[in-house]
Amino acid sequence: MKLKRRRKLVTYLNLLDQPIRFNPFLFSRTFLLWALLGLIGGVIAGAYWIGLEFLMHKLAFFNGWQVIPVMASCGLLAGLVIHFFGDPGEINLIVNNIRFNKGKLDPKNNPSMILSSLVCVASGGSLGPEAPLVQITGSTGTWIGKLFRLKGEELRSLSIAGMASGFTALFGAPLGGSLFALEILHHKHAAEYYKAIIPALVASCFSYLVFAVIIQLGLGPIWDLSTYEYSGIFDFGYAVLFAIIGAAFGWGFIFSTRFFKSIFEYRSIPIYLKTLTGGILLGIIAYYFPLTRYFGHHEINELLSSEFSLALLVAILIFKIIAISITVTSGWRGGFIIPLFFVGATLGLIFHKLFPAINLTLAVVSCMAAINACVTRTPMSTTILLATLTGFGHFIPILFASLTGYFLAPRIPFISSQKEQ
C-alpha cells in the first residue's frame, strides 16, 4: 500500500515539475483573428447604437401630426443616400453571398447601409438595427479574411463569425446569435457551416463584452417576463395552441408584405420616391397609433406595462403588421426580428384580454416565438434569444412554440434565398 502511494506521489511531482502547457490552438492565428473580429464588431455595434440613440432622441421631439412630414423627409433622405451611394442590398443578398459566393460579403456599400439604416430606424420605421449590423460586421469579417489572405471555408467562417458578432452585440445572446448566423442561411443546410460555429461563438463573446462596456449594458432581460410559474403538463398544450394562432399571423404578415411589394413594384420608379411614399404612409400610421412607431425595443415594455382596451390592441396588431410590411417593401433599411416580437407580444396580450385565466407570460412568449420562427425559419436561435431577452426561465415551452411556428411556415420561405438550391 505504501509503495502505491509513493508511486502516485512521484507521478504527481513529475507532473508539477513540467512547465504548464496550454492548448496551442488558444494562441493560434485563427483564434486571434476570431477574437480581433469580435472586438472590432463590438466597437462597430457600440458606435452604431450610440449614433442611433442620439438620432432617435432628437427625432422623438416631433410628435402628433409632425411625424408625417418628419418620416416623409427621412424616407426621402434615405432613398437619396441609397440612390447616390449605392444599394446596400437586403438579407437575401447576405444569404446568397454566404451560400454561393464563397462567403464573400462586399464592404463597399457599408457607408450607404450605415447612413440609410440610421435614418430609417431613428425616424420611426418599423425595422430594427439587427440586419444592418449583421451586414456591416459580416462584411468586416470578409475584409479581415482577405487582408490575411484566407480562402475557402476559412473566409466563409470568418464572414459568418462577423455576422454573429453584430447580431450578438444587439441581443446580448452569444449562443443565440451564433446559431442565428447559421440558421438564417438555410435551416436544412445549417450543418454545412458547422465549422463556423466555434469562430462565431468566439467572436460573439468578444463582441458582446466590448458592446456591454461601451453602452453599459446589464446582463438582465430586456423585456421582463420572468414571473411565469409552471402549472402542469397542459402548459405545453397551451404553448402549441398559442403558437398555431401565432403562425397564422406570421402567414398574414408574409401575405401583407407580398401585397405591398406588388404595389411598390407595379411601376419602376426611383428608390427615393418609394422611400418617400413609404415614409408618408408610416407617418400617417404613427400619427393615429403612436406605439407602432419605431422597431419595438422600448415599445414592448410600454405595451406590457400599460392597460389598453381590446379594440386598441387589435388595431395596434393590424397596423403594426402593415407598418412592417410597408417598411420592408418601400426600400427602408433595417431588420424585422424585433418588430415581429412586438407583433407576438401584442397578440399574446389580446389572448389574455379574451381569456383572463390564461397565463399572460406564456401566451406572450409563445406568440413571439411562433411568429418569428414562422417567418425566419430559425427555431433554435429564436428559442435561445427569447429565453435571454425575456428572462423566461422555462426553456421547453418556448421550444415547443418555436418548432410549431417553424413547421407551420409556408412552403415558399419569406426570405427567398432560403429556398432549396
Image (cartoon, rainbow, N blue to C red):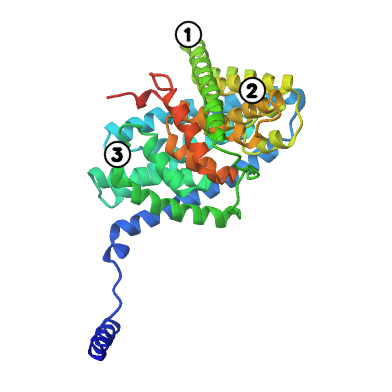
The residue at 42%/53% (across/down) is 38
Query: Mark 2 packing: few (<14 Cα in 10 Å), some, or many (20+)?
Result: many
Q: Nearer the viewer, mark 2 or mark 1?
A: 2
Q: Nearer the viewer, residue 298 or 175?
A: 175
The amino acid marked with disc number 1 is: Tyr
Q: Is residue 343 above or below residue 251?
A: below
102 up-or-down from 329: above or below: below
Residue at x 75% of width, y 27% of height: 308
Q: CA distance from mark 1 to mark 3?
A: 39 Å
Residue in front for this viewpoint, 202 or 232: 232
User: Where is mark 3, residue-wise?
Assistant: 191
Q: Quadrant of the N terminus?
A: bottom left
Q: Of 100 and 11, which appears nearest the observer?
A: 11
Within-10-Å neighbours for mark 1: few <14, some 14–19, many 20+: few
Report the disc number at residue 266: 1
Q: Is residue 414 left or right of residue 148?
A: right
Give percent across and percent down for residue 275.
55, 21
Residue topped by disc 2: 317
Q: Is residue 333 visible?
A: no
Whole-percent x and y of residue 389? Answer: 57, 43
Return the x and y of residue 360 as percentages of the image width and height: 66, 34
Left or right of 155 on screen, residue 55: right
Task: Identify the element where label 2 is drawn.
Answer: helix
Q: Identity of the amino acid at label 2? A: Leu
Q: Residues within 10 Å of mark 3 (few under 14, many from 20)?
A: few
Q: Amino acid at mark 3?
A: Ala
Asked if residue 267 is positioned above or below residue 106 in the image, the reply reads: above
Q: Earlier in the sequence, mark 2 or mark 1?
A: 1
The alpha-carbon separation of the residues under discs 2 and 1 comes to: 27 Å
Residue 158 lies, with reference to residue 330, above or below; the image says: below
